[in-house]
Image (cartoon, coloured by chain):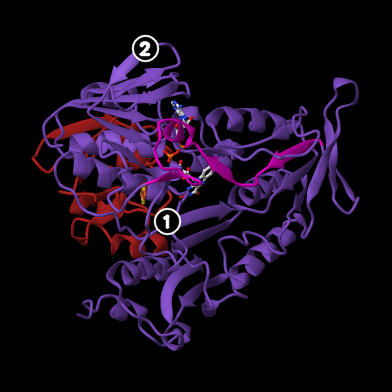
Amino acid sequence: MSRPGTVLVLGTGQAGFQVAASLREEGFDGRVVLVGDEPGLPYQRPPLSKAYLTGKADANAVRLRPDKFFAEHRLELRAGERAARIDRAGRRVALASGEAIPYDHLVLALGARNRALPVPGAGLDGVAQLRTLGDAEALRGRLDAARQAVVVGAGFIGLEFAAVAAARGVAVTVVEAADRPMARSLSPAMSAFFRGAHERQDVRFVFGATVVRVLGGEGGGLATGVETADGRRFPADLVLVGIGVVPNAELAAEAGLAVADGIAVDEHLATDDPAISAIGDCARHPCRFAAAGTGPTRIESVQNAVDQARCVAARIAGRPAPYGAVPWFWSDQGALKLQIAGLATPHERAVVRGDPAGGAFSVFCFREGRLVGVESVNRPLDHVLARKLLANGIGLAPEQAADPRFDLKAHASVPRAA
Amino acid sequence: MPNIVFVHPDGAREELEIAEGTSLMQGATAQGIDGIVAECGGNCMCATCHVYVEPSQLALLPAMSEEEDALLDGTASERQPNSRLSCQISVTPALDGLLVNLPERQV
Ligand SMILES: Cc1cc2nc3c(=O)[nH]c(=O)nc-3n(C[C@H](O)[C@H](O)[C@H](O)COP(=O)(O)OP(=O)(O)OC[C@H]3O[C@@H](n4cnc5c(N)ncnc54)[C@H](O)[C@@H]3O)c2cc1C
Ligand code: FES
């Protein structure tokens, strides 16, 4: 669709904002309408579990752009409005308010919501989650008064929160069903390093444990702790639940689009209706970096949201190209910054480059003999070079990665072999 | 507040007042400037906040970290000796009058 028309974007998170901004950068001259159910200007989520939680950043600092930007670029922002139904035949979307907005192209950037803890007591006061600015604001208040916290789930967000809470003197226990932190995404070596680092900050881990109940609530009171399947009880005045997300795919499913833990899209990020694209946390795409046979992939990261947004904006502006950006991600946990390039899960071989004992190293992960992902702490150059290797399909042998004398930088600048 | 001059690739100048302690990137994007993308929000991960600093003023800036140096190798517009990442430059009174050129592209 190269002629101007109306592009309607549902969801005003990282992906929704970016597709609108990129449409203008690409010279798209039609109408751009952004509908999002959160109040206010679009903002970034990463600081919510980092600088915002520690008080280093305020609500203004997490905003992506000021009001003026939307006006200058003629982006019609409809904040605080919920999309209720997609009428594909009529090419319009009904809002919860009753209004209908017509579109020529619809971009679904609906994100994901936190998975609820499916146990009794999960709704008690004192049980918190962290996805939105509203959640973060509430959590920041609670943190001021908290003395003992239980974090359910040792994923990125849970551990970022744990580090912030522990640094403020809160006694933190992390309860996790797997046998190591960030098991879904990280190599055992990097996972073990982060476990040690958190433990040195007095974060306590309980692995292989499933929470079956949140305790407390007698007489309408607060949560007082959690109980695990083996009957152990962990007291807390604050319970943070970080057990993953559920993609917001219902609108698409109700409109008859293919959905399977995310909205299904092709390599151009189009759904099975060519007038509708889906991007970011809500979309599942054929990813050239995923393991063969694992099927389409849903990635939750700023990089994925932003690069997918650009890909769709370029297509709408008349310059289609398949999506193929290298995935990258970071997580700040206390004083440590983890950087990840590629998709390392699953891998059968992992080699270490650098010095884990000194806290500066990378884990290079190989699947079927090919480099598929690199995890780094305090080795920023490894991370940058890993992105280059992966983007250009430059081969690397595990022995080369492990050899400290091997010049990775020179290797990464070698032009791609034909 | 220190005054910072941003020069767009077409020569257009934009003067912005940026509070001390705020990064150049943060101050500029909060005022809606075009030409700085900053998709990682100042985390030294994306290199889309690249600027060219007026060479005679380079010495006023804080030294470059290993992280910034590494990332600058991956900018969309070519790295020059006066390339910096604007998210890594915290504004101080000494930077009043700083002039930075925005690159042709950030992605
Ligand atoms: C606390 C936290 C920390 C994170 N840290 C990092 C990090 O360090 N690095 C990193 O790379 N990534 C991080 N992420 C992940 C990253 O923020 C997400 O991947 C990214 O925000 C996805 O963008 P999105 O636009 O797809 O979804 P979202 O940002 O979730 O935006 C979707 C929007 O759509 C709205 N919406 C949903 N349904 C409707 C409807 N029917 N009508 C209208 N609006 C609707 C939602 O309310 C939401 O505002 C973090 C996430 C969280 C929550
Ligand atoms: S904003 Fe991403 S590196 Fe500066």
Name the chain letter of the residue that bears numbered label 1.
A
User: Which residues are the magenta region?
Assistant: A237-264
Left or right side of A363 for A263:
left
**What hue represents chain A?**
purple
Residue A103 vs A390, above or below: the answer is: above
Residue A106 vs A200, above or below: the answer is: above
The part of the image, by quadrant, that contains residue A97 is top left
Note whether residue B3 is visible.
no
Residue A156 vs A402, above or below: the answer is: above
What number is the disc on residue A296?
1
Q: Return the residue nearer the eye: B102 or A400.
A: A400
Residue B70 vs A415, above or below: the answer is: above
Chain in red, by letter, is: B
Please tell me whether residue A248 belongs to the stretch shown in magenta.
yes
Asked whether the residues under marks 2 and 1 belong to the same chain, the reply is yes
Q: Secondary structure at mark 2?
A: loop
Q: Return the residue nearer the eye: A353 or A315.
A: A315
Left or right side of A336 for A317:
left
Please tell me whether residue A327 belongs to the stretch shown in magenta.
no
Left or right side of A6 for A408:
right
Q: Residue at image x 64%, y 32%?
A: A140
Q: Secondary structure at mark 1?
A: loop
